């Protein structure tokens, strides 16, 4: 099916308005296809004109326009021509549709734990035509009236309250006008928890096999949901615009969640069955708040075209973190954002695939899909946080409420939003938007002393920044502890701005720019400040200040300005004193996952992992219990020597980590995977563990372990599953890819690298964007950090014409590889 172009969408929107969809789904027709019948009423502004409906059927049985049969043979590449339109039109479509195994369209899943079957929609950007006939573009909103026939033991949920009208028959309440990508249905033998809040029915739903875990998670989930719901009603003048609020935790969802009105779907890993860290619990709560924000930004008011993705995602990202901090016990959201989420935006914004937060023109849906990335989410949220800091909360919220009131149940653009904000303030919001939302890249701020002029802040880049500057001195009684002398507000609108007003001391021990992390920028240090960082980082009094410094050190490494070994020294010296769980988890993740494996000389790997293991053991022996799980996970992944292997085996036998947590299912699989990588586990042990944990997560754990076996036959089997057998779901493909490439198995794997690019190109073309993304992100030969991989990848991009989703992933991977090679060459 060709990508819908912006020009085609604009032409169709000028011609027609869609009034109503009546859709019936029959889910009782086997495990390959379901029946989808649609009656669509729409008006045309030009009698006799022509357009098309979007549809990707397994078989098109009947199509009628105003009682006139249409030839099914005219269906071409997902588009059925509609000619001879009247002012008022009725289109009837009867088709069989394919179930999906890649999380696109109507996904079907059989639970390995009990054999029960579940189906749900994931329509996203351009998957509605895989469910039913639709005019699939966001600005053709309509009322959706959905009925479903399902097996008698199933329950059905949708965008509105659903009612059983007979055995296996369900009616879902008609929606207000919504876009086609927001249509939602979830059907299966769900375990449900129902309640009521603010006069509306609320519900939680999961697979039956996760029912006990949903029950144990429900109190926190519902408390977060209620608190955020109430807070949004304090922020927004417009009340929640739908008739119910269900949250379904569904299997094999490609995204973290999908904001379908009235029925939000989440990946069911959020129904925790094993221990999780505080940052992970907080992140789940952020996602709940994020999706709820979409009820207003995205669902009530929807972007007109996909160049304004930021109007959906940046707003939901910003509000998710802000509302959670304001309304719940999760009060450290912005520290978590600073250390773990913001880097997602920084990294994306420095790759060749970067784009503005709000691009001026996105040509088609395939291009738009690529923009659901760290720029639209993390950078966009950072820009909005900066806007609020500059504009003030009161004026910002006044503009937001004016925007919602003007465009409720309609569509809007960046210009519309700027007009609404402009009416609430005398500041030049349009100029701000041009500088922040229409540009790419990351600015850099640095303090300068020891010059003939007074101290100043140098800005590299073009954006204005409203920031706080922290001035710190060492404590007299403890030189490793820093005391905040003063925090200054600074508006940086020029390349060079005075740092300190006259009369203030000019040389604090540490000048920390962007203290509080209000802006989106890299920061650098003067020489004296950096010396203070190396000696006193852990002595900064506030965790968000420490997060800003850790991120700055990370940027210095990635930009080739700080030897990776110096960053590791910071970790060894200061991380053991850290008390914030998000910082500990974020720094351990970067150090283990990027610095040791990609940026350091491989000859140092064993020594580096041993040193990092020592940091983790420090947390286990004396640190807060809140830090134990992050430390234990990293300690497992640092195992590299024979002594480490023996220790892992002892833990597996004992069922717990010494001085650490007991082994729950997720830790058992992680530990078994590491033993497998090191050649210390057998296929029989993997099979026994799967018998012990026959869940969907267990299936994924077993797939990782089987692919990680250091055996030529096992590697061949895993490769064939990924690239020669299209039966794997996106989740099992990802798990297999994650197990396949291991730095410890270089000799065994190097022969596969030349074949990867052709294999990935072929599977991406066959299986669509979700698998293309997985093939480029997870199956890329990351451990092969050498110029040969870079050359082969470049040849693929030049000659093989990979589909857009894979091309984007490969371009990003190759840029990251080039960065790693440069760092290794600079600091051998």
Image (cartoon, helix red, strand yellow):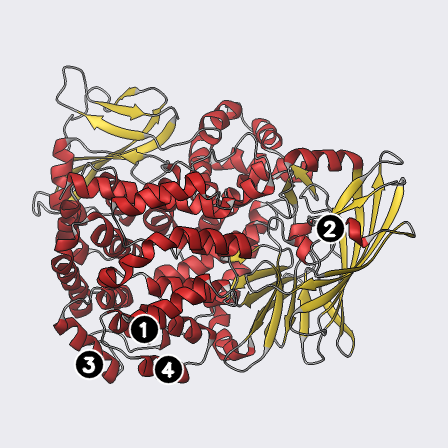
Q: Select label 3 or label 4 by which is in front.
A: 4
Choose between 445 and 136: the one closer to the eye.
136
Answer with left or right where residue 40 lies relative to residue 636. Answer: right
| Residue 508 visible within the image | yes
Query: Of label 2 and label 4, which has the lower sequence position?
Result: 2
Dot 3: element = helix
Task: Work out how far the residue at label 3 is from the one at label 1, CA to CA, in angstroms.
Answer: 14 Å
Answer with left or right where residue 69 lies relative to residue 696. Answer: right
Task: Work out how far the residue at label 1 is from the one at label 4, CA to CA, in angstroms.
Answer: 17 Å
Task: Work out how far the residue at label 2 is from the one at label 4, CA to CA, in angstroms.
Answer: 45 Å
Choose between 512 and 183: the one closer to the eye.
183
Specify the label residue 337 is tagged with.
Answer: none
Density class for disc 1 (Cα within 10 Å; few <14, some 14-19, many ≥20) is many
Instruction: Work out whether 151 lies above or below 448.
Output: below
| Residue 780 visible within the image | no
- Evaluate if marks 3 and 2 touch, with contact meaning CB atoms under 8 Å apart: no
- Evaluate if marks 1 and 4 touch, with contact meaning CB atoms under 8 Å apart: no
Task: Work out how far the residue at label 1 is from the one at label 2, CA to CA, in angstroms.
Answer: 45 Å
The residue tagged 1 is 667
Query: Of label 3 and label 4, which has the lower sequence position?
Result: 3
Residue 320 in picture, x, y percent from top left = 48, 50
The residue tagged 2 is 134
Specify the label residue 650 is tagged with.
Answer: 3
Dot 2: element = loop
Q: Select label 2 or label 4 by which is in front.
A: 4
Query: Of label 3 and label 1, which has the lower sequence position?
Result: 3
The residue sitting at the top extreme is 452
Query: Of label 1 and label 4, which has the lower sequence position?
Result: 1
Task: Work out how far the residue at label 3 is from the one at label 4, CA to CA, in angstroms.
Answer: 19 Å
The residue tagged 4 is 687
């Amino acid at each position: 099916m060709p990508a819908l172009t912006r020009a085609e969408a604009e032409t169709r929107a000028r011609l027609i308005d869609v009034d109503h969809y009546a859709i019936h789904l029959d889910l009782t027709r086997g495990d390959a296809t379901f029946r989808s019948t649609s009656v669509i009423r729409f008006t045309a502004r030009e009698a006799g004109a022509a357009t098309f409906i979007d549809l990707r059927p397994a078989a098109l049985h009947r199509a009628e326009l105003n009682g006139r049969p249409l030839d099914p043979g005219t269906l071409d590449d997902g588009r059925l021509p509609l000619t001879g339109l009247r002012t008022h039109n009725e289109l009837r479509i009867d088709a069989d549709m394919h179930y999906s195994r890649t999380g696109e369209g109507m996904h079907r899943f059989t639970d390995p734990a009990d054999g029960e079957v579940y189906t749900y929609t994931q329509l996203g950007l351009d998957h509605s035509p895989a469910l039913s006939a639709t005019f699939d573009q966001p600005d053709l909103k309509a009322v959706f009236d959905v009925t479903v026939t399902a097996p008698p033991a199933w329950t059905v949920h949708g965008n509105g309250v659903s009612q059983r009208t007979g055995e296996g028959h369900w009616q879902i309440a008609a929606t207000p006008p919504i876009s086609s990508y927001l249509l939602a249905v979830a059907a299966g033998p769900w375990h449900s928890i129902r309640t009521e809040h603010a006069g509306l029915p609320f519900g939680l739903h999961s697979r039956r096999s996760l029912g006990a875990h949903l029950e144990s998670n429900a109190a926190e989930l519902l408390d977060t949901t209620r608190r955020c719901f109430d807070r949004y009603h304090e922020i927004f003048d417009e009340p929640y615009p739908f008739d119910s609020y269900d949250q379904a935790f569904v299997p094999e969802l490609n995204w973290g969640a999908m904001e379908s009105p009235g029925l939000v779907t989440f990946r069911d890993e959020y129904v925790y069955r094993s221990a999780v860290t505080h940052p992970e619990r907080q992140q789940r709560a952020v996602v709940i708040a994020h999706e709820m924000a979409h009820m207003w930004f995205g669902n009530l008011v929807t972007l007109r075209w996909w160049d304004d993705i930021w109007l959906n995602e940046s707003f939901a990202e910003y509000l998710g973190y802000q509302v959670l901090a304001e309304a719940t016990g999760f009060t450290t959201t912005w520290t978590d954002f600073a250390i773990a989420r913001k880097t997602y935006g920084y990294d994306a914004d420095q790759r060749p695939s970067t784009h503005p937060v709000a691009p001026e023109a996105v040509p088609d849906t395939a291009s738009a899909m690529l923009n659901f990335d760290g720029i639209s989410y993390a950078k966009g949220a950072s820009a909005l946080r900066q806007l609020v800091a500059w504009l003030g909360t009161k004026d910002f919220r006044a503009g937001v409420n004016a925007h919602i009131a003007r465009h409720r149940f309609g569509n809007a653009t960046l210009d519309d939003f700027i007009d609404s904000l402009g009416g609430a303030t005398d500041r030049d919001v349009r100029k701000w938007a041009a500088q922040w939302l229409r540009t790419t890249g990351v600015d850099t701020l640095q303090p300068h002393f020891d010059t003939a002029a007074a101290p100043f802040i140098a800005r590299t880049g073009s954006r204005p920044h409203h920031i706080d500057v922290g001035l710190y001195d060492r404590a007299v009684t403890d030189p490793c502890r820093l005391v905040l002398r003063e925090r200054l507000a600074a508006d940086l609108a020029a390349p060079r701005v005075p740092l300190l007003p006259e009369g203030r001391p000019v040389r604090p021990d540490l000048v920390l720019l962007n203290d509080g992390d209000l802006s989106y920028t890299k920061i650098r240090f003067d020489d004296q400040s950096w010396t203070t960082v190396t000696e006193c980082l852990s002595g900064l009094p506030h965790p968000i200040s420490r997060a800003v410094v850790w991120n700055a050190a990370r940027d210095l490494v990635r930009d080739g300005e700080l030897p990776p070994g110096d960053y590791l020294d910071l970790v060894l010296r200061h991380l053991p004193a850290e008390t914030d769980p998000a910082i500990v988890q974020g720094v351990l993740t970067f150090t283990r996952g990027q610095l040791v494996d990609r940026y350091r000389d491989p000859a140092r790997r064993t020594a580096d992992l041993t040193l990092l293991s020592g940091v983790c053991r420090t947390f286990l022996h004396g640190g807060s219990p809140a830090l134990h799980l992050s430390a234990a996970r990293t300690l497992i992944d640092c195992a590299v020597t024979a002594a480490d292997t023996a220790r892992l085996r002892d833990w597996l036998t004992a069922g717990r980590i010494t001085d650490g947590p007991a082994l729950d299912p997720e830790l058992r699989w992680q530990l078994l995977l590491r033993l497998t990588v090191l050649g210390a586990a057998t296929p029989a042990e993997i099979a026994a563990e799967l018998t012990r944990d026959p869940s969907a997560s267990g299936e994924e754990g077993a797939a990782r372990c089987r692919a990680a076996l250091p055996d030529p036959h096992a590697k061949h089997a895993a490769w064939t599953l990924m690239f020669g057998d299209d039966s794997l779901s996106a989740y099992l493909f990802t798990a297999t890819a994650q197990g396949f490439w291991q730095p410890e198995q270089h000799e065994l794997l190097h022969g596969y690298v030349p074949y990867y690019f052709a294999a990935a190109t072929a599977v991406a073309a066959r299986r669509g964007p979700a698998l293309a993304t997985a093939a480029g992100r997870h199956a890329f030969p990351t451990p092969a950090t050498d110029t040969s991989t870079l050359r082969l990848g470049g040849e693929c991009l030049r000659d093989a014409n990979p589909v857009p989703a894979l091309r984007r992933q490969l371009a990003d991977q190759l840029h990251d590889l080039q960065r790693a090679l440069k760092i290794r060459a600079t600091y051998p």
